[in-house]
Image (cartoon, helix red, strand yellow):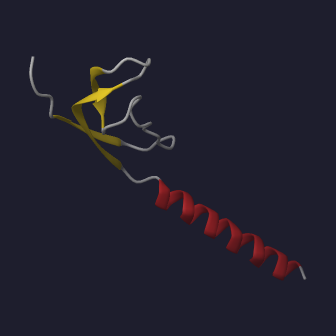
Amino acid sequence: MRFFTLALCFSLFKVTFSAVIKTRTDKVVTINVVNAQLTPNGFERSTVVADGQFPGPAITALKGQTLQVTVNNKLVGP
């Protein structure tokens, strides 16, 4: 019985540890900054948005993860 319990604990540790290793890879995020006509306060106006969203998308990462963020400037006009 002890051997079975020990083997079960070891296999669970191995699965958990391998899952943590696989999730700690680099994360690549690309954001396109563009012009858009929005009504954030009830009045339509020209705005600058990230990926067509206001507010822009959240960037989430795990502790120890390396982020690579690319921002593409697709603004037009002055």
Q: Quadrant of residue 8?
A: bottom right
Residue farthest to the left, as pictured: 77
Q: Position of residue 56 (x, y in %)?
A: 38, 32
Nearer the observer, 25 or 31: 31
Q: Residue 42 appears at what percent x and percent y?
A: 43, 19
Q: Quadrant of residue 18?
A: bottom right
Above or below for 56 versus 8: above
Instruction: Give how far across and how far down residue 46 sits, in percent.
Output: 25, 21
Task: Please tell me which residue is depicted at 36% across the width and 50% down the height of the picture.
Answer: 26
On screen, residue 76 versus residue 70, left or right, reads: left
Q: Looking at the figure, which quarter contains the C terminus? A: top left
59 or 1, nearer to the observer: 59
Image side of residue 42 versus residue 33, left or right: right
Quadrant in which the N terminus is drawn: bottom right
User: Is 61 above or below relative to 16?
Assistant: above
Residue at 41 percent across and 22 percent down: it is 40
Q: Is residue 17 left or right of residue 36?
A: right
In the image, taking residue 17 as reference, residue 12 lies left or right, namely right
